[in-house]
Image (cartoon, rainbow, N blue to C red):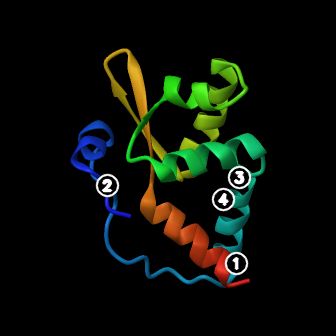
Amino acid sequence: MKSSPVAERACGPALEGPDLRAVEGPEADAELAELAKALGHPARVRILRLLVRKDACICGEIVGELPLAQSTVSQHLKVLKESGLVRGEVDGPRTCYCVEPRAVRRLKALVGSL
């Protein structure tokens, strides 16, 4: 999942390199629980899917894709950002949100270890 030059300019470079942390054990279990909590609402799952399909996305574009108010979408984006699954960069009067590929790979690895 390589980011485009547009996404990199808007959201900064993605974290690269392998994640060598364990996928089992108390720390991994706590990490998986936190990520699952962040994805514990269907709107957040939908937002993450939208961001995975695009290289970068402005909040207004996300609002246009969901039957939710802008303030509700912003709250869901905040939860995703706090979890590390999404990063957001201020771009003038807007905030550009991008998926964090390394965090999504980590989530897949943790779920795959179940």
State the separation of the CA atoms marked 3 and 1.
20 Å
Labels 3 and 2 touching (C-beta < 8 A): no
Q: What residue did someone put label 3 on?
A: 39
Crowdedness near tag 2: few (<14), some (14–19) or many (≥20) residues, C-alpha within 10 Å: some
Precedes in sequence: disc 3 or disc 2: 2
Q: Kindly report the distance in space between the C-alpha atoms of the residues bearing marks 4 and 2.
A: 22 Å
**According to the image, label 4 marks what residue?**
35
Image position of 79 with respect to 36: above or below: above
Residue furthest out toward the top: 93
Q: Is residue 103 above or below residue 94?
A: below
For label 2, the residue is: 3
Disc 2 marks a residue whose amino acid type is Ser
Earlier in the chain: of badge 4 and badge 2, it is 2
For badge 3, the amino acid type reads Leu
Assess whether mark 4 and mark 3 are in contact (beta carbons under 8 angstroms).
yes
Image coordinates of residue 48 in percent, x first then y, are 59, 49
What is the three-letter code of the residue carrying label 1? Pro
Q: Quadrant of residue 110?
A: bottom right
Q: Which residue is mark 1?
A: 26
Location of the C terminus (image quadrant): bottom right
